[in-house]
Amino acid sequence: MATTRIMPLHTGKGRTVGQAISDILDYSKNPQKTDNGQLITSWQCDSRIADAEFLFTKRQYIQKTGRVRGEDDVIAYHLRQSFRPGEITPEEANRLGCELARRFTKGNHAFIVCTHIDKSHIHNHIIWNSTALSQTRKFRNFWGSTRAVRRLSDTICIENGYSIVEDPKRHGKSYNKWLGDQKKPSHRERICFAIDDALAQKPESLEALLTLLREAGYEVKGKKVPSLMGGEQKKFIRMDTLGPGYTPADLRAVIAGEMEHTPRQRLAAKSTPEKRSGNLLVDIQAKLRAGKGAGYARWATLFNLKQMAQTVAYLQENELLDYDTLAEKASAASARYHDISGRIKAAEKRMTEIAVMRTHIINYAKTRDTYVAYRKAGYSKKFLSEHESDITLHKAAKQYFDAQGVKKLPTIKSLNAEYAALIAEKKAAYSEYRKAREDMKELLTAKANIDRFLGTEEVHEEPDATKEKEAEQR
């Protein structure tokens, strides 16, 4: 489940355009929040010099169009995308952020996506240049852009198997408070649940169904279109606003057997919950040596009993009561997870290389004439001061080509084709990756608990398991 917020960025008082761009990019690229820069992805720009590239594009725009705005000019757009805690990995969040930025800007603007992991909820900071790559137009915020970007984000989340907020009504609440509110069903959802329960009793008519709703504590008014109020509701809700399957006409058709009714899904009501292996057992003696008291020991003893019971139930359900079989399965699951993870990381590394190469090729081509003129001017300091941004980009591109040992530059078309193939490969691997990660986590937790229970764990096994668990949570 992701939430979004779009914010236009202005120069502000006492800052140049370059300083304003650098400030927001420096905040977004903070290495302490982006896993030392591992969670930064750029499109049509190099994240290391994105501020210079943004500024270069803006100068080219002015030269081509002659249009210059004042202090009210929007220099870039900042989009924040936040995810539900524990639902997504940082790498996956970064990928979805890139997909959102590309589809929202239609690939016409350079952008950088920085995924922050310093909060309990993983979130993206997406910065895109207001000036288009064509250098002839700008992105203009439009009426309803907030709703448009939210709908696009929801679509991407659904396509990738993540939950969305069905009826977001934040109205200035903080993310944490708003997120907590979503755990409670809305008044309309409660009414739908009550209707589901009433239909399960096979009422003979809509009037009989309304009688069952009255018995459930709802006040009913209106004849042609009944309205309901109950619980903490402050006003009546018309039944024709409950959505498909719950309108008076639909309910009459369901009762008459002319239509099939699909009850609304309840997040907290799974009929056959999957048995999990539980959490790692607590080393009570180690905690006592670290200063914990008798109260903690009592809590930890009860906690361990519950986790061990859950582990045994998991082993029984998956027919893993033989220790050798459990150890073999855990080893195989770990190997499978790391294999898939390695393939995804290799694809991501190559995608980064392609993005950087593509950016430098474009910059090299755009600034070649300027650099040739600079060389013909005898590397004049005056010429350098007038075209410093262009010359800096050209030198950076040439240095990159030399460092990579590139003799002949690849075409942008071939790079784009390879990049698209890698995206498809990575997207296909992610569903397999999530399943492999959960399987490994469950099996390693079960094996660690059995090892501790049998007293066969190694001295340093717990810290390693803790690190593995922390890595998975990240």
Image: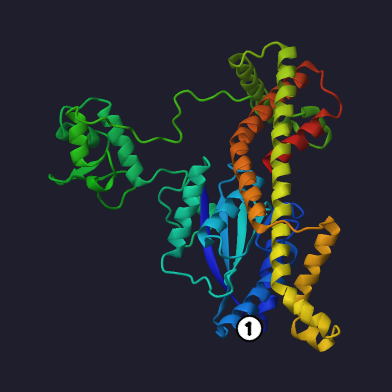
Please report the residue visible at 47 percent of the width from the left and 54 percent of the height from the top. Answer: 152
Q: Is residue 11 left or right of residue 47?
A: left
Q: Is residue 231 left or right of residue 173?
A: left
Vertical comparison of 446 with 286: above or below: above
Please report the residue visible at 71 percent of the width from the left and 14 percent of the height from the top. Answer: 325
Vertical comparison of 259 with 172: above or below: above
Q: Position of residue 472 (x, y in %)?
A: 69, 38
Vertical comparison of 374 with 459: above or below: below
**Element carrying mark 1:** loop
Q: Is residue 143 left or right of residue 474?
A: left
Q: Is residue 287 left or right of residue 81?
A: right
Farthest residue, direction bottom: 382
Q: Position of residue 213 (x, y in %)?
A: 24, 36
**Residue 463: quadrant of the picture:** top right
Q: Position of residue 109 (x, y in %)?
A: 58, 65
**Residue 340: quadrant of the picture:** top right
Along the viewing direction, whichever of 228 and 49 lies nearer the viewer: 49
Q: Position of residue 230 (x, y in %)?
A: 29, 44
Vertical comparison of 408 with 198: above or below: below
Residue neighbourhood size for the residue with mark 1, other residues' Cα within 10 Å, grouped as few (<14), some (14–19), many (≥20): few
Which residue does the numbered mark 1 point to in the structure image?
A: 13
Of the residues shown, which amino acid type is indicated by label 1?
A: Lys
Residue 379 in view of the camera: yes
